[in-house]
Image (tube, grey):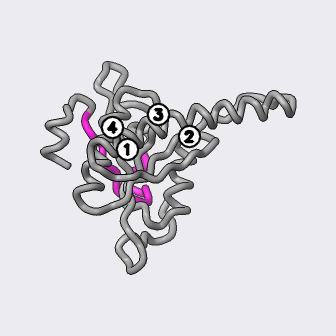
């Protein structure tokens, strides 16, 4: 899974922290940590929303309408996350929307953007386990293209402030 080399710290480049935005409760922990850390070290923050691909083909008009609705929902979630990042770290995050299997789109974005130097995820704190993204990245961590920061789901904002 190793891709092209990272250029985050070369002249004309800047490190970028990638955080996946979704509707899980732990998402805010990852966003908070990534924003605080990016603000502290002068990195950029890139927020990614991944739209699940439809399970079947639609008639052209219906499919286009569904795509537009999914993109509008993604933009609304990313705007809410951007407000949170601005509030906690006074930074303006970048945004990306992708359609496809989530894990594949994360890796694809990292491979395309050579300034991404860190993937920030948060572990779920419920009995269901750490969550599918954390579980996936742990399986492929040895060959993942960038370091992965996993924020424990039970940490509060004050505890994250002390770490970020």
Could you give the CA–CA distance between mark 1 and mark 4, rounded to whole angstroms?
12 Å
Mark 2 and mark 3 in contact? Answer it, CB < 8 Å: yes
Viewer-nearest residue: 162 or 85: 85
Residue at 41% x, 73% y is: 13
Which residue is disc 4 drawn over?
Answer: 122
What residue is at 16 percent from the left and 47 percent from the top?
A: 163
Q: Around disc 4, counting alpha carbons within 10 Å, would you say few (fewer than 14), some (14 to 19), or many (20 or more)? A: many
Residue at the limit of the structure toward the bottom, as seen here:
11
Give me the C-alpha separation between circle 2 and circle 4: 16 Å
Q: Secondary structure at mark 1?
A: helix
Q: Nearer the viewer, mark 1 or mark 4?
A: 4
- Where residue 54 appears, x then y in whole percent? 70, 31
Q: What is the number of the mark on residue 50?
A: 2
Q: Which mark is residue 138?
A: 1
What separation in Å lies between label 3 and label 1 (alpha carbons)? 19 Å
Query: What separation in Å lies between label 2 and label 3 (alpha carbons)?
Result: 8 Å
Tag 2–tag 4 contact (CB < 8 Å)? no
Count residues near mark 2 (Cα–Cα under 10 Å), then give few for <14, some for 14-19, many for 20+.
many
Who is closer to the viewer here, 12 or 83?
83
| Residue 151 within the magenta-colored segment of the rendering | yes
Give residue 35's position: percent from left, percent from top: 31, 48
Q: Say which label, 1 or 2, has the lower sequence index.
A: 2
């Amino acid at each position: 899974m190793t891709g092209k080399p990272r250029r985050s710290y070369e002249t004309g480049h800047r490190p970028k922290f990638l955080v996946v935005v979704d509707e899980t409760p732990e998402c805010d922990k990852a966003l908070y940590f990534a924003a605080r850390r990016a603000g502290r070290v002068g990195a950029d923050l890139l927020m990614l929303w991944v739209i699940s691909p439809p399970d079947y083909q639609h008639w052209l008009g219906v499919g286009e309408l569904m795509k537009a609705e999914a993109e509008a929902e993604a933009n609304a979630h990313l705007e809410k996350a951007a407000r949170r990042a601005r509030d906690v770290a006074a930074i303006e995050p970048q945004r990306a929307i992708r359609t496809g299997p989530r894990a594949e789109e994360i890796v694809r974005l990292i491979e395309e953007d050579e300034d991404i130097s860190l993937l920030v995820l948060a572990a779920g704190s419920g009995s269901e386990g750490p969550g599918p993204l954390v579980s996936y990245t742990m399986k492929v961590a040895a060959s993942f293209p960038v370091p992965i920061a996993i924020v424990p789901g039970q940490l509060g904002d004050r505890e994250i402030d002390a770490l970020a």
